[in-house]
Amino acid sequence: MAEIWYMEMNAENLDGQEPRYSLEFTECIELLKLSPERWKCGPEKIPNIKTGNPFIDESGYVGVLVIVSQDEIEALAIKGEWKAGWYHSPLTLVGTEKAMARKKIR
C-alpha cells in the first residue's frame, strides 16, 4: 500500500506524524493525478517540496505526497518509468479531501 502524506514544506523528518491515507499505488495515480515526472526523491529521504514561488513558499505551504515502496512498484503492471519513492501531487489539501470523498461514495 502506498501512503498519502500531508507534509509541511520545511519538514526534515516524519517524527510524530502519520500518513493521512493508505491506498494501492495504482489508485493513487489516477486519484491524485500522479505521473513519473512528479517523483521527488527516493523513499529513504524527506522530499523538498519548495515551489520556487516565494509567495507560496513563505506562506507555510503543505503538500500532498505519496510514498511507494519498491515492492509495490515491482508488482505494477504499468512499471515503465515509475520508481520507488515520494511523488508530489498537484492537488491541494482541499482537492485531495474532495477526491477521497468521491472515492468513498463510489
Image (spheres, helix red, strand yellow):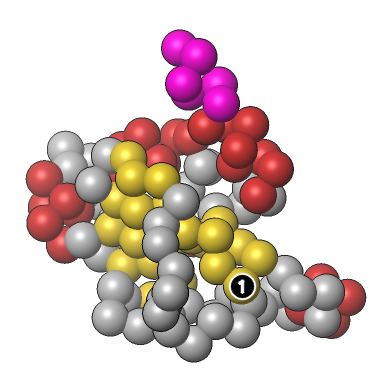
Q: Secondary structure at mark 1?
A: strand
Using a 10 Å C-alpha cutoff, classify the residue at mark 1 as few (fewer than 14 neighbours), some (14 to 19) or many (20 or more).
some
Where in the figure is residue 31, as x and y percent of width and height?
Answer: 48, 35
Magenta stretch contains residue 105: yes
> Magenta region: which residues?
101-106
Tag 1 residue: 8
Where in the figure is residue 81, as x and y percent of width and height?
Answer: 29, 57
Q: Nearer the viewer, residue 102 or 80?
A: 102
Is residue 66 shown to the viewer in this render? no
Q: Residue at x 51, y 42 (%)?
A: 32
Magenta stretch contains residue 82: no
Q: Furthest-bottom residue in view?
A: 12
Q: Main secondary structure of the magenta part?
A: helix
Is residue 10 shown to the viewer in this render? yes
Q: Furthest-right residue in view?
A: 55
Query: Image quarter for residue 7?
Result: bottom right
